[in-house]
Image (cartoon, rainbow, N blue to C red):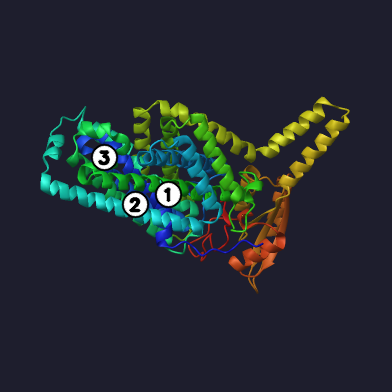
């Protein structure tokens, strides 16, 4: 059965999917920032909002120019090497995995408030399984659930804010004044810095929209960035401010894990505390869904680029890469089992991964400006704004390491195995060739078993290298052709390459192009180069026609950085990659 074609996500649906993640942060980030910044926590949260404002244009520029799934991975893949892009992907994968497990576990802790005796570990696994099934059924069905959760969450936060303001109007601001007069531990600058570093964790989810941009309707992506920024700017500082007006700082510290429920108890009693606990359960569950959807988009792109095994590409009747979803579920459950639900351990992985992804996306923006200036983009972030945003994220990363140095060791325990898997995939031809050489070297007269193994290894190497790639050139520049071959040799598993020049009707083949390609064919004997003159107009129709004719996916077709007159986006070209 053919996969069903789903319509793109509208503004509300796309915002809800990533918004559940970023707005669920108010459940913990207010208390966390108050722990470090005291009565100035709301200022630290506003500082985070300023940084996120600059990231709106950073993400808008990169994804506008490269509107493909993958986030930071996609940005770096089209501006640097596949290895560097894969490192960014490893950070993102770990961030999603930690987010899924933390959010599911915290959701079940909130549910335990309403359902006494709930077995949290088993319930966490059950929740992960529910969202695995939802994701397998397709992003459209998942979006309906996400939208319902998102609307309930915004309504609940609105009720809590109104109840708190009503209570303060009648009971006065005495508690806030007492909190405000407390002496700051250490310097005010350090308190604000540490509060800012902790509060930066409250913008997790902002990067998620870039990982499923291909599933969104045209023009929706920048609106998701705007909506998430507005939600974080309003909800998080306001909640911290109201918490300081309702309870002494010491009392807030004692209710760190469920501060908003405690605020509901103060302002509205049991019914509001119960509503907030239910809302927390649902919106944290929505953050789990965000992780499943985001990781599916990212891994699908990595599999297409042969950074991960091709077996993950298989789709079901809903058009979903269900093997990716199931693999993510299994990994999340294994992490939960290994850590036994210790959130401190997972927080170490999550903190460094998420902030590293944000910093790398900023770096991707700078590289896009320098190396891909000819690409059309709807917005352009200023150099000063990008540099400021990267510096702010790196400062937050340093602050979190300073507050919790043990996080670094925990992070590398998970990061290194992830990188090793990707490195094996990127270097599997070298590893297989080494194994083949070893077998042949230790046994001059091959035994029957060794001979069979040698044939299997050689067949596998040939199969991997059989993937042909295409480079489109306007011709006349030997240096660019050489750079393209260097990139293919260093980043792709192939020994076959088509170099294509597209000539319009009545046009002529660029002079010396055929001679230059013959020279390069001799210079790179390990790559079989085929020169093709294609008559027609370079564009999406031609790409699709050649992709079907040659059975070469569009993401294995490469171009150089276009000039300002280029009229197509990479999405319109089906995912053709920029390599020089």
Secondary structure at numbered mark 1:
helix
Q: Residue at x 21, y 29 (%)?
A: 187
Side of 487 where 29 appears, left or right: left
For residue 557, what is the image quadrant? bottom right
In the depicted view, which residue is nearer to us: 310 or 280?
Answer: 280
| CB-based contact (under 8 Å), mark 1 and mark 2 | yes
For the N terminus, the image quarter is bottom right
Occupied quadrant, residue 99: top left
Residue shown at the point (20%, 45%) measured from the top left: 267
Dot in front, 3 or 1: 3
Q: Residues within 10 Å of mark 1 (few under 14, many from 20)?
A: many
Residue 160 seen from this side: yes
Q: Which mark is residue 286?
A: 1
Q: How many marks on residues?
A: 3
Q: Earlier in the sequence, mark 2 or mark 3?
A: 2
Q: Identify the residue under disc 2.
A: 153
- Residue 171 x %, y %: 11, 44
> In the image, is 151 to the left or to the right of 341?
left
Q: Does 103 appear above or below 220?
A: above
Query: Which residue is rendered at x = 16% and y = 50% of the image?
Result: 166
């Amino acid at each position: 059965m053919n996969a069903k074609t789903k319509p793109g996500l509208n503004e509300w649906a796309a915002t809800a999917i990533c918004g559940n993640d970023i707005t669920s942060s108010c459940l913990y980030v207010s208390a966390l920032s108050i722990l470090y910044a005291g009565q100035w926590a709301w200022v630290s949260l506003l500082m985070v909002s300023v940084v996120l404002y600059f990231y709106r244009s950073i993400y808008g520029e990169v994804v506008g120019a490269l509107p493909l799934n993958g986030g930071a991975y996609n940005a770096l893949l089209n501006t640097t090497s596949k290895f560097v892009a894969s490192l960014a992907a490893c950070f993102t994968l770990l961030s999603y995995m930690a987010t899924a497990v933390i959010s599911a576990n915290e959701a079940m802790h909130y549910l335990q408030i309403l359902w006494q005796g709930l077995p949290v570990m088993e319930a966490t696994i059950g929740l992960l399984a529910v969202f695995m099934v939802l994701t397998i059924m397709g992003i459209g069905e998942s979006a309906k659930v996400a939208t319902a959760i998102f609307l309930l969450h915004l309504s609940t936060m609105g009720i809590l804010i109104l109840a708190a303001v009503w209570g303060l109007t009648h009971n006065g601001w005495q508690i806030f004044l007492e909190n405000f007069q407390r002496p700051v531990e250490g310097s005010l600058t350090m308190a604000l810095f540490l509060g800012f570093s902790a509060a930066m964790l409250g913008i997790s989810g902002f990067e998620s929209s870039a990982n499923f941009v291909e599933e969104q309707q045209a023009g929706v992506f920048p609106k998701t960035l705007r909506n998430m920024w507005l939600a974080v700017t309003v909800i998080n500082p306001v909640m911290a401010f109201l918490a300081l007006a309702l309870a002494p700082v010491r009392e807030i510290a004692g209710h760190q894990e469920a501060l908003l429920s405690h605020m509901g108890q103060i302002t509205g009693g049991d019914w509001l505390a119960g509503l907030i606990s239910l809302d927390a359960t649902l919106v944290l569950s929505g953050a789990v869904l965000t992780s499943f959807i985001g990781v599916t988009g990212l891994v699908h792109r990595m599999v297409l680029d042969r950074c991960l095994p091709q077996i993950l590409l298989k789709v079901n009747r809903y058009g979903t890469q269900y093997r990716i979803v199931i693999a993510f579920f299994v990994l999340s459950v294994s992490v939960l089992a290994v850590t036994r639900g210790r959130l401190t351990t997972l927080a170490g992985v999550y903190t460094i991964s998420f902030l590293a992804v944000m910093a790398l996306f900023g770096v991707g923006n700078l590289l896009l400006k320098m190396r891909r200036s000819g690409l059309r983009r709807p917005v352009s972030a200023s150099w000063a704004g990008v540099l400021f945003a990267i510096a702010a994220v790196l400062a937050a990363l340093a602050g979190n390491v300073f507050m919790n140095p043990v996080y670094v060791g925990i992070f590398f325990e998970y990061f290194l195995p992830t990188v090793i898997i990707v490195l094996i995939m990127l270097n599997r031809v070298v590893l297989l060739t080494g194994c083949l050489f070893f077998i042949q070297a230790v046994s001059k007269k091959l035994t029957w078993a060794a001979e069979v193994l040698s044939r299997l290894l050689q067949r596998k190497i040939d199969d991997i290298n059989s993937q042909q790639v295409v480079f489109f050139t306007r011709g006349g520049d030997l240096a660019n052709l050489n750079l393209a071959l260097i990139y293919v040799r260093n980043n792709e598993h192939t020994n076959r390459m088509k170099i294509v020049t597209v000539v319009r009707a009545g046009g002529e083949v660029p002079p010396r192009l055929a001679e230059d390609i013959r020279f390069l064919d001799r210079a790179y004997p390990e790559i079989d180069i085929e020169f093709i003159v294609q008559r027609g107009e370079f564009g999406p129709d031609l790409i699709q026609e050649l992709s079907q004719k040659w059975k070469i996916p569009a993401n294995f077709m490469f171009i150089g950085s276009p000039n300002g007159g280029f009229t197509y986006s990479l999405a319109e070209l089906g995912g053709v990659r920029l390599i020089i």
